[in-house]
Amino acid sequence: MKRKIVGLFFCMMLITGMNFASSTNSFNEKNTITKKTHSQDYLLYENFSGTFPPEGWSTDWWTQCNGSCRPESPCACFLGDHSNSYITSKTVDASNYGKINLRFFLDGSYSYPQYTYIWIKIKINETSQWKDITPWDNPISEHLLPFLLDIDIVLGPDNSADAFQFNLSSYEVYGSNIKLYLDDVLIYNSHSNNPPNPPIIEGSSKGKIGVEHEYTFNATDPDDDPVMYIIEWADNNTEWTEYIESGEEIILKHTWSDEGVYTIKAKAKDLYNEESDWTYFEVTMPKSYNNPLWGYRGFGDRFSLLQRLIEVLIR
Ligand SMILES: [Ca+2]
Ligand SMILES: [Ca+2]
């Protein structure tokens, strides 16, 4: 086991944090991160659904919450009952990796950002000091939350990170004004990750205004990671799906309200935020036949069958 501290080359990091505060309309609250059970290269995944604190974790005032969690309850939370708080992950052996990523969701609120401090720290092994990798200045001075943070951590070729740990701590002068919600902590090896293949889109290329159309999306990930889909329906509607297994079909319904040619765009994103290229699928919406009878609903399926029959006959 290497204990080489000199020459230890860890850190630094590239922040690819996404602040969902400014794009809440595109964040699907139903998004869930699926825990992979197969050949996956992650070192730690914690969604706080079990006993609290999870085995190997430690904290002072953090507890388990069932509301306000992002992406999914339950999560770990600190409800501002003290000025200081911390939560520390269990240790993981990252000594086989030159680079890892630390990713988590953090949400919450505070009244006085100018008196609020939030730190992210890592520890490489049991004898090393905590290293501050906070990607913002403290006090935070402005409203940062909520976000999904994804931090690249370069450990270097001589890495001795055999007891790697992550720590989140906070300090707020008026302690009761801060609330923090932490969820889906993932420490993973991003080095070997490949993006998913572009999704295959299946469905009708001709449609009718005001009628719901079904489209099937299917993408595979070379690493067999769970994938989610981002679909732009070309009428200013964008849809995000939940994560599903690689290669599993997902069926989505959409209704266009104006005539025209619409180019659906879809891409797949894997659990580690790697995105596929876009796939395009053109749909033509001719005018709807303005027969008042067809607007009548009540005959159920038999009537829509009749409607389709008449439609074929008059074409
Ligand atoms: Ca959770
Ligand atoms: Ca992948």
Image (cartoon, helix red, strand yellow):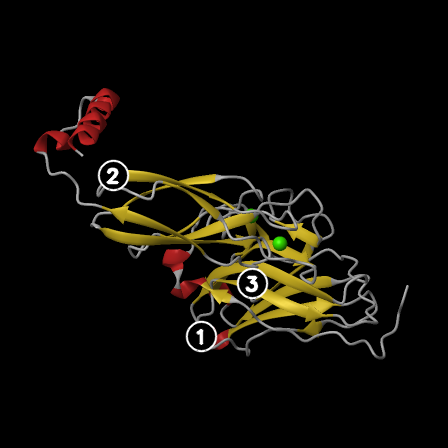
Which structural element holds mark 1? loop
The amino acid type, in three-letter code, at marker 1 is Glu
Which structural element holds mark 3? loop
The residue shown at (30%, 53%) is 262
Q: Position of residue 264 (x, y in %)?
A: 37, 52
**Residue 180 shows in this picture:** no
**Residue 166 shows in this picture:** yes
Q: CA distance from mark 3 to mark 2?
A: 55 Å
Q: Would residue 228 be found to the left or right of residue 283 on screen? A: right
The residue shown at (29%, 43%) is 206
Q: Position of residue 148 (x, y in %)?
A: 52, 61
The amino acid type, in three-letter code, at marker 3 is His
Q: Which residue is mark 2?
A: 211
Q: Which residue is mark 3?
A: 82
The amino acid type, in three-letter code, at marker 2 is Val
Dot label at residue 142: 1
Q: Quadrant of the C terminus?
A: top left
The reply to whether dot 3 and dot 2 touch (C-beta < 8 Å) is: no
Which numbered disc flags the more N-terminal residue, 2 or 1? 1
Q: Position of residue 71 (x, y in %)?
A: 50, 51
